[in-house]
């Protein structure tokens, strides 16, 4: 009588516990601006999603990586700013709204065509967040990140136009999100959809503002000579 020895592990169980990771993530992450820590966080997020945990906290992530909670939070925020990760709202069966991570921006980056890559420029969505942080001199809050995302995704405003509105707010000495939002809404109302149109509108505005001033007036705000360059055609 032959006795069939039971396998010490189930192949089916092993297959059920696989986390699908595209080969492109492992071969192309450097070319899209990621490092090893960021890639490991993204893989962990994918694993959590497979396990139906769509919004793991930095504390939950630290259980599976060598990074501390603060570093995880910092890297997650950076991935959102780079346009590799998004935070979306999902409706549950009971009607409640919950937040969830979305890796589609990462997959879009990895699988974009060569033609799409050529069209990327320094005014892409990822660098917009960096420009804002440089001007404000601090990290952006989650609310501010959501506001920029709303301009880009919901209002469909071109990144170059958001950049132009940021420069205009600096030029006016009114560096705050409400003022930038007002600029963008005003441009939209006027049918302005390009940087060139915005530049002409701003030139006309500043010409009207400066006209009544006397020659000897020395009233000035912060030195904004760099930002006047964008009015002269430098993007």
Image (cartoon, rainbow, N blue to C red):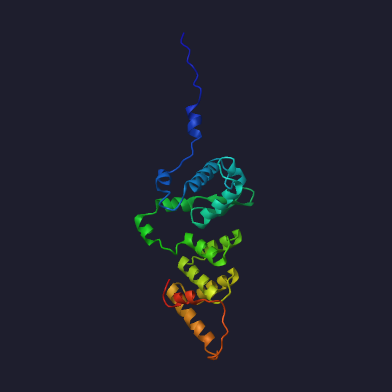
Q: Is 128 located above or below residue 100 in the figure?
A: below
Where 221 sits versus 110, above or below?
A: below
Q: Position of residue 161 (x, y in %)?
A: 47, 70
User: What residue lies at 48% left-to-right and 83% top-to-bottom?
Assistant: 204
Looking at the image, the residue that sits furthest to the top is 1
Residue 159 appears in the picture as rendered: yes
Residue drawn at (45%, 79%) of the image:
200
How many numbered tags mark residues here?
0
Front position in the image: 141 or 49: 141
Please identify the quadrant where the C terminus is shown: bottom left
Residue at 53 percent across and 86 percent down: it is 210
Residue at far left of view: 115
Is residue 63 toward the left or the right of residue 20 in the image?
right
Measuring from the top left, give residue 120's x and y in whole percent: 40, 61
Provide residue 42's location: percent of width, then percent of height: 51, 46
Q: Is residue 57 visible?
A: no
Q: Closer to the camera, 230 or 161?
A: 230
- Which x, y percent locates residue 3? 48, 12
Is residue 232 depicted above or below 147 in this figure? below
């Amino acid at each position: 009588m032959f006795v069939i020895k039971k396998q010490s592990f189930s192949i089916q169980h092993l297959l059920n516990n696989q986390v699908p990771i595209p080969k492109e993530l492992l071969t192309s992450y450097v070319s899209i601006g990621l490092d090893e820590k960021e890639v490991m966080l993204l893989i962990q997020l994918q694993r959590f999603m497979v396990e139906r945990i769509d919004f793991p906290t930095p504390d939950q992530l630290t259980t599976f990586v060598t990074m501390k909670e603060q570093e995880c939070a910092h890297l997650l925020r950076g991935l959102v700013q780079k346009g590799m990760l998004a935070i979306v709202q999902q409706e549950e069966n009971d009607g409640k709204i919950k937040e969830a991570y979305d890796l589609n921006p990462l997959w879009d980056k990895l699988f974009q065509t060569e033609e799409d890559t050529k069209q990327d420029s320094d005014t892409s969505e990822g660098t917009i967040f960096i420009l804002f942080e440089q001007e404000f001199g601090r990290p952006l809050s989650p609310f501010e990140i959501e506001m920029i995302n709303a301009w880009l995704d919901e209002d469909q405003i071109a990144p170059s136009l958001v950049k132009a509105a940021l420069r205009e707010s600096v030029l006016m000495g009114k560096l705050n999100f409400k003022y930038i939002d007002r600029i963008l809404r005003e441009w939209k109302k006027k049918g302005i959809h390009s940087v060139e149109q915005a530049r002409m509108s701003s030139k006309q505005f500043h010409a009207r503002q400066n006209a009544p001033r006397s020659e000897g007036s020395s009233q000035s705000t912060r030195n904004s000579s760099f930002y006047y360059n964008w009015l002269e055609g430098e993007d």
